[in-house]
Image (cartoon, helix red, strand yellow):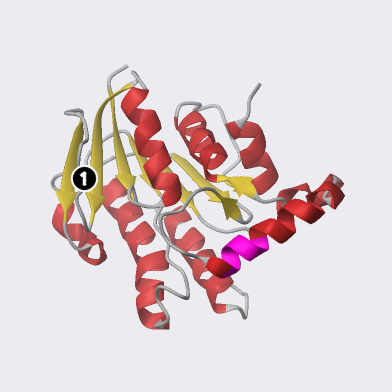
Amino acid sequence: MNKTAIILGATGLTGSIILQKLIKDNRYGTIKLFSRSKIEGLPNKVTQFIGNLLELEQFKADFTGDDVFCCIGTTKAKTPDKSLYKKIDYGIPVAAAKVSKANNIDSFLVISAMGANKNSTVFYNKTKGEMEQDVLQQNLKNTFILRPSLIAGNRNENRTLEKIGLVIFKVIQPLFIGKLKKYKSIEAETIAEAMINLANDKNHTEVIITSDQINKLGNPK
């Protein structure tokens, strides 16, 4: 195989892990990154397209490939303006799905959140739910929406409250059994592995992938 992967959000935690995995993955001959800033020191199989992702349509001619890995996401702390927050967390994934459809890309994987619900009164959950709904409306053949719990991993940025939450989660996680398994924190490495496995398993029929399912797909052994 000599596939082309597209990554949105390669400078973030999960996106950066996917990038490193795909660089080593012989199934992918080309990796296209669409981002606001350049990543230095990447091999020749990686091509970078730098610009404003809020205007993703400008990249349409180059937005061609086989599998789209959409790892876009911000936080309330980084983006307190709700209008801008929605443009990022909702607008970019939906625009990417629309461009994918226009360019006949049928494999689209996007990270959402466990509490996503378009009818929620919580802004964050509502935004993610609306994103999911409008991505699915593009009717891409192999669409997978991943809903992880709290994501663990080594971030370059300082997220104090999130770190505290992860410590608490690790203490109480032994209590998460049965239906509560999906609430366990999950490693970004596991999410990345699950997304790559899903992109290369066209027989997987579930579209919404819950956190406990992500854990199984990312740890198949």
Q: Position of residue 82 (x, y in %)?
A: 42, 81
Looking at the image, residue 165 sits to the left or right of residue 51; the answer is right
The front one of 123 and 206 is 123
Q: Is residue 37 magenta?
A: no
Q: Position of residue 122 (x, y in %)?
A: 60, 78
Q: At 66% across and 40% down in the image, what residue appears?
A: 213
Residue type at numbered disc 1: Phe
Q: Is residue 163 magenta?
A: yes
- The magenta segment is 161-165
**Callout 1: 10 Å neighbours few (<14), some, many (20+)?**
many
Q: Position of residue 192 (x, y in %)?
A: 48, 39
Q: At 19% across and 50% down in the image, what residue appears?
A: 38
Is residue 116 visible in the rendered image? The answer is: no
Is residue 77 visible in the rendered image? The answer is: yes
Looking at the image, residue 200 sits to the left or right of residue 5; the answer is right
Q: Position of residue 46 (x, y in %)?
A: 21, 34
Q: Quadrant of the N terminus?
A: top left
The part of the image, by quadrant, that contains residue 120 is bottom right
Q: At 18% across and 44% down in the image, what residue appears?
A: 48
- What is the secondary structure assignment of the residue under circle 1? loop
**How would you classify the magenta stretch by its main secondary structure?**
helix
The front one of 89 and 141 is 89
Image: 6 above or below 129:
above
Q: Which residue is mark 1?
A: 63
Q: Quadrant of the C terminus?
A: top right
